Image (tube, rainbow, N blue to C red):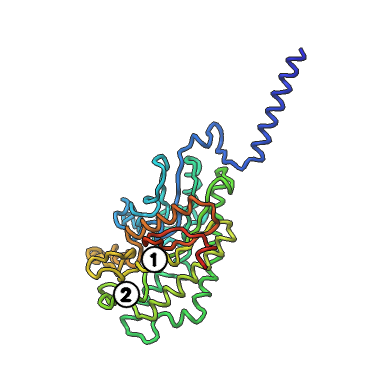
């Protein structure tokens, strides 16, 4: 009888211990009978064009204008070029042109696609998501693509003040300030989507990226026109030295408030911007030049998107960005910058060393 009571007491204590471990553990437990290791692992990217793969070509069916979906998810997108174990699923929810509202839990639909947060919440039930990479904000108040277009227009008009003079008078900082709370709310909705599936903050990595400058003052003179990069020198310098770094600094603040890791891409394209490589082959360039889909111009519905690929990372550029992102994912550093190594390849340098 005593032996039976002792055995029962041991089982009771063991059960209490297991319950206590579950309560204090920070491990993801999806709903029984599923267990974490039984779910297939996955890495998910959410956000806009840099992560969708815009400029990389070979767009996934259904995202190249079909049904008015212009997300341009490329097989060359960074998530598809990460060095990952073969059993890890790569999922790309990012959509070219996306604004912060596309990542919010509400509304359910933005354009023709469901909210990326809603899609993520469903995926988190079916996969063991180890990394969520976010890149968002440039298409909101900063309107970075619109700024680039305005700079092209300033070149065409030969406007003496260029496009950057007005922006450099405090307007750009104001735009970034207005964007920050929207980006923060979007990232928090992404975090909430993971929370809803039972994840805890330390059971996966939430990484926020900034943006790289696609152009620089070092463009080849013969390409400083409609053949490649129609920008005035002062505007090229402003985009690289002021516009992109200030946007990156604003997103770094968002990442800190959201308790996300941060990857600074502001200098990732240095020396490999559009129109800095071989004039004929574009060898050495990681970003597309002015790109026009002439066939699309013949179609009323496709015409507005005929230049959508312009000044985005090309397939080689996406591969380099993926190289740096993969290195960062393998570390525990809270922040890093993508900078070229001695061979010219991007590498993730801890922010403490990158600013020296």
* Between 31 and 340, the one nearer to me in the picture: 340
Evaluate whether residue 156 shows in this view. yes
Indicate which disc, 1 or 2, sits on the residue closer to the N terminus. 2
Q: In the current view of this chain or complex, which residue is farthest to the top?
A: 1
State the residue at coordinates (43%, 67%).
Answer: 267
As drawn, the label of residue 135 is none
How far from the left and from the top, in percent, is residue 108? 48, 53
Q: Which residue is mark 2?
A: 219
Which quadrant would residue 165 be assigned to in this image?
bottom left
Q: From what the image shows, is residue 14 above or below residue 235?
A: above
How far from the left and from the top, in percent, is residue 300? 27, 65
How far from the left and from the top, in percent, is residue 266? 45, 67
Evaluate whether residue 182 shows in this view. no
Horizontal side of residue 12 vs 276, given as left or right? right
Q: Which residue is mark 1?
A: 269
Q: Tag 1's secondary structure?
A: loop
C-alpha span from label 1 to label 2: 13 Å
The count of marks equals 2
Quadrant of the snapshot with the N terminus = top right
Q: Tag 2's secondary structure?
A: loop
């Amino acid at each position: 009888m005593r032996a039976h009571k002792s055995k029962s007491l041991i089982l009771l204590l063991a059960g209490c211990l297991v319950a206590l471990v579950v309560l204090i553990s920070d491990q993801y437990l999806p709903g029984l009978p599923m267990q974490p290791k039984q779910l297939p692992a996955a890495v998910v990217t959410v956000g806009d064009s840099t992560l969708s793969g815009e400029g990389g070509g070979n767009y996934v069916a259904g995202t190249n204008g079909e049904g008015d979906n212009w997300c341009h998810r490329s097989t060359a997108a960074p998530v598809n070029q990460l060095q990952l174990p073969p059993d890890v699923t790569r999922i790309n929810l990012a959509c070219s042109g996306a604004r912060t509202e596309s990542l919010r839990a509400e509304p359910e639909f933005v354009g023709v696609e469901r909210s990326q947060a809603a899609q993520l919440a469903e995926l988190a039930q079916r996969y063991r998501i180890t990394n969520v990479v976010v890149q968002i904000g440039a298409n909101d108040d900063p309107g970075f693509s619109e700024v680039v277009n305005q700079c092209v227009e300033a070149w065409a008009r030969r406007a003496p003040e260029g496009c950057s003079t007005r922006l450099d008078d405090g307007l750009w900082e104001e735009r970034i300030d207005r964007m920050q709370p929207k980006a923060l709310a979007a990232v928090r909705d992404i975090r909430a989507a993971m929370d809803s599936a039972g994840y805890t903050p330390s059971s996966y990595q939430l990484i926020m990226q900034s943006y790289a400058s696609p152009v620089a003052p070092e463009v080849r003179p013969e390409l400083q026109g409609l053949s490649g990069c129609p920008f005035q020198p002062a505007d090229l310098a402003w985009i690289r030295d002021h516009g992109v770094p200030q946007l990156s600094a604003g997103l770094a603040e968002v990442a800190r408030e959201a308790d996300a890791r941060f990857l600074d891409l502001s200098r990732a394209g240095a020396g490999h911007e559009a129109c800095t490589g071989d004039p004929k082959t574009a060898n050495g360039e990681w970003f597309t030049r002015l790109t026009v889909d002439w066939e699309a111009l013949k179609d009323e519905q496709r015409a507005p998107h005929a230049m959508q690929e312009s000044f985005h990372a090309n397939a080689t550029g996406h591969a380099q960005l993926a190289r740096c992102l993969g290195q960062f994912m393998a570390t525990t550093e809270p922040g890093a910058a993508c900078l070229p190594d001695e061979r010219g390849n991007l590498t993730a340098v801890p922010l403490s060393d990158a600013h020296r």
